[in-house]
Amino acid sequence: MSDDVIDDVVVVGGGVIGLTTALTLAERGLRVRVWSRDPAAGTTSAVAGALWWPYRIEPAEQVGGWSLESLRVYEKLAADPVGTGVRIVAGVHADTTLAELGDWAREVSGLRQLTAAQVPGPHGTGLAARLPLIDMPVHLAWLRGRVEAAGGVVEQRTVTGFAEAARSARVVVDCAGFGARDLVPDAGLRPVRGQLVLVENPGIEEWFTAADGASSETTYFFPQPGRLILGGTAQEGDERLEPDPATAAAIVARCARIRPEIAGARVLGHRVGLRPARAGGVRLDAEPLPSGGRLVHNYGHGGAGVTVAWGCARRAADLACG
């Protein structure tokens, strides 16, 4: 181990996974430093919708537990929506039944099966729910503030290899998201492109989703303070970061079939992010570093990083401290 080690942990990655993990570690009394290539507003996490729901994430046998741990945290944070960015909001998951969900669904209060007549648009069934809906720019700023209040440091810094971080800390935690494809390297990581349209909210108070896991097109809208977020896409292997005008028009049209007033809403902007999907699902494990330290991996959360952030952070912290 190098003599110039100054921290207990360096967390590589400053999105929701990285900051939540850093906060969990700092609150356990460790000296934590976050190295993030991008400012929080420039991360994939900042683009997210972000509704709590296990979506496009594996392994199924562990996702439920991670998700429920995170749900309990968000339910508490919703007591201060202005500060934390977390609100509990009602909405509908179309084309979803209770029977097709995992055991975790029994622990989500208020999930209720709907008939076709109760689901807007051309959908045969759906679920009513009240779930955490997170304003990500606000939440990421809150996470950073909590990390710093706990004595952690957040730096904008590009990392070219984990050995660089290992010279500064005994433990390195890899929360690099899609960036782990090159850092690890991990050829099993693949981008799943998501494109969103932000519009003025014409008075919609409930969220709506209709997401076919086998399709590259989804339909959803999330009312966030000052805007309505429309989605979306799930384009595997597509690394384009520029918004596509035709895709944006199609997103608006799909959402307007559910709520016609969306068609005339003024467009405020467009967002594109690459979800870090991974063959085999989330990687959450530890390995020794040549320096004598430990490298903990916490990446590959696909489209549900927000949903599992706290559960995965606690497992990563256990590995870092073990």
Image: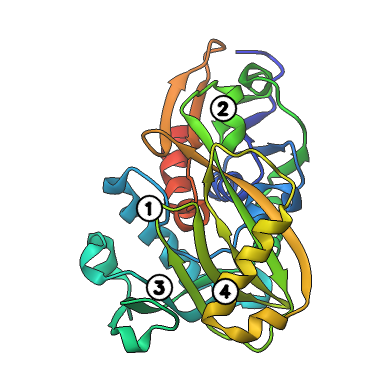
Disc 2 marks which residue? Answer: 181
Q: CA distance from mark 1 to mark 4?
A: 30 Å
Q: Which mark is residue 66?
A: 1
Query: Residue 119 vs residue 9: left or right?
Result: left
How far across and down, in percent of the image, does residue 113 sit? 27, 80
Residue type, numbered disc 4: Cys
Q: Of discs 3 and 2, which sits in the foreground?
A: 3
Disc 3 marks which residue? Answer: 93
Going from N to C along the chain, the mark reached first, 3 or 2, is 3
Q: Nearer the viewer, residue 192 or 244?
A: 244
Going from N to C along the chain, the mark reached first, 1 or 4, is 1
Residues tagged 1 and 3 counted as in contact (Cβ below 8 A):
no
Going from N to C along the chain, the mark reached first, 4 or 2, is 2
Residues tagged 1 and 4 counted as in contact (Cβ below 8 A):
no
Q: Of discs 4 and 2, which sits in the foreground?
A: 4
Q: Of discs 1 and 4, which sits in the foreground?
A: 4
Image quarter hosting the C terminus:
top left
Residue type, numbered disc 3: His
Q: Residue at x 41, y 43 (%)?
A: 315
Residues tagged 4 and 2 counted as in contact (Cβ below 8 A):
no
Disc 4 marks which residue? Answer: 255
Q: CA distance from mark 3 to mark 2?
A: 32 Å
Can you say whether 157 is above or below 84 in the image?
A: above
